[in-house]
Image (spheres, rainbow, N blue to C red):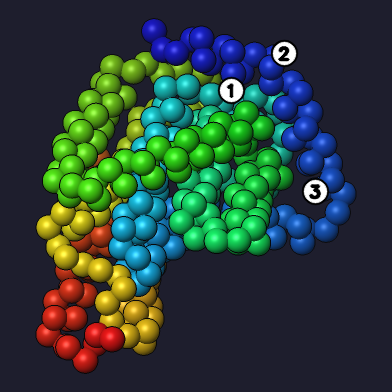
């Protein structure tokens, strides 16, 4: 027995029809005008994908403020895990499955596989850019910029036809909750860094329990259209391991680094910070484009899919900071 209540409520005709009508209204505008706006929103939606927020969190973590970087990575990691788990519990289909009148932008379909609820892009944007607003929103202009980025990512998911309003709003709520919750938790851990070890154990145990349930005990709908399975949960589960691997890798690495390595992003000259940001970002992009995407698009086993991003997360939050720390200690001119 899978989650009948959530599926029936979130996909019920009376609930979903007004949302489909809104998507059709946006679709009519999109079709009637040039593709320029669609190209713009395809670019904006990348602000909520895996790569861009990862690089933003990394640069803050390596070059600006290590504590704030840990905070952002905790938001980034938990958002991935929470959003993916809710998707697999709710099992709500994409808009074009709920209504054959919806025709999404084709270029947006590559990362719009599987279930729809909630919008992971919106949740990611709300958590990361909301976290940046929390830490660096010293005036209304900066706060407005980050809020605008969040709203544009959410709206882009509607414009592209890959999510319903309920998906976007729920993603927004998830992100906002995590922004305030993790701010309290990280401040608490900073007062006694041994707490980071307890947080690692708690997160890993909960994550393992949820993964076991999702993979072995949760039941998924097997609905067919013209003999074709709408969503194959087996493929979706294997693919989701990429997100879970990055989530567990980054949060474990960040907490371990904060507990055992006296790494501070503030150390070093500005030129050295720029250099470490460029080198680190370059390595992330190359690894993501040529390793993660390769594993994602090929039929590798579950352990490989998990490990390939888990290693990336550990490198970003533990190995690379340790390398920076070693260089700083052995090149004293690197300090201010």
Pick whichever of labels 3 and 2 is earlier in the sequence: 2
Gap in angstroms between the C-alphas marked 1 and 3: 29 Å
Q: Residue 16 carries which label?
A: none
In the displayed structure, 22 sits above or below 28; it is: above
Out of 54 and 189, give the one closest to the viewer: 189
Classify residue 216 as left or right of residue 11: left
Q: Mark 3 points at which residue?
A: 30
Note whether residue 308 is visible.
Answer: no
Q: Is mark 1 on a helix, strand or loop?
A: loop
Note whether residue 56 is visible.
Answer: yes
Mark 3 Cα-neighbour bin, 10 Å: few <14, some 14–19, many ≥20? some
Residue drawn at 86 percent across, 54 percent down: 33
Out of 140 and 55, give the one closest to the viewer: 140
Out of 305 and 89, give the one closest to the viewer: 89
In percent of width and height, residue 80 lies at: 40, 42
Q: In which quarter of the image is residue 16?
A: top right
Give the label, 1 or 3, closer to the camera. Answer: 3
Quadrant where the image shows the C terminus: bottom left
In percent of width and height, residue 208 lies at: 21, 31
Q: Mark 2 points at which residue?
A: 14
Q: Is mark 2 on a helix, strand or loop?
A: helix
């Amino acid at each position: 027995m899978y989650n009948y209540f959530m599926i029936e409520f979130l996909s019920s005709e009376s609930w979903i029809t007004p949302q489909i009508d809104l998507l059709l209204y946006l679709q009519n505008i999109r079709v009637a005008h040039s593709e320029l706006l669609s190209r713009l929103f395809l670019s904006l939606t990348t602000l909520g994908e895996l790569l861009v927020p990862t690089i933003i969190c990394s640069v803050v973590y390596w070059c600006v403020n290590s504590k704030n970087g840990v905070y952002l990575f905790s938001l980034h990691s938990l958002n991935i895990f929470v959003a993916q788990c809710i998707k697999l519990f709710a099992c709500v289909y994409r808009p074009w499955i709920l209504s054959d009148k919806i025709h999404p932008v084709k270029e947006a379909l590559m990362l719009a596989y599987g279930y729809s609820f909630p919008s992971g892009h919106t949740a990611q944007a709300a958590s990361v850019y909301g976290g940046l607003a929390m830490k660096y929103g010293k005036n209304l202009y900066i706060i407005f910029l980050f809020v605008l980025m969040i709203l544009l990512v959410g709206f882009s998911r509607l414009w592209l036809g890959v999510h319903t309003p309920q998906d976007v709003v729920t993603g927004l709520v998830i992100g906002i909750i995590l922004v305030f919750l993790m701010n309290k938790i990280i401040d608490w851990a900073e007062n006694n860094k041994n707490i980071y070890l307890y947080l690692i154990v708690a997160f890993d145990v909960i994550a393992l329990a949820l993964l076991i349930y999702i993979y072995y005990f949760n039941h998924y709908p097997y609905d067919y259209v013209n003999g074709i399975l709408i969503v194959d949960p087996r493929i979706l589960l294997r693919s989701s391991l990429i997100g879970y691997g990055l989530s567990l890798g980054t949060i474990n690495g960040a907490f371990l680094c904060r507990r055992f390595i006296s790494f501070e992003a503030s150390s070093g000259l500005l030129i050295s910070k720029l250099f470490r940001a460029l080198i680190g970002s370059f390595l992330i992009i190359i690894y993501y484009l040529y390793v993660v995407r390769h594993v994602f698009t090929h039929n590798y086993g579950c352990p490989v899919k998990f490990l390939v991003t888990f290693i990336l997360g550990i490198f970003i939050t533990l190995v690379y900071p340790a390398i920076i720390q070693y260089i700083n200690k052995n090149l004293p001119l690197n300090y201010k």
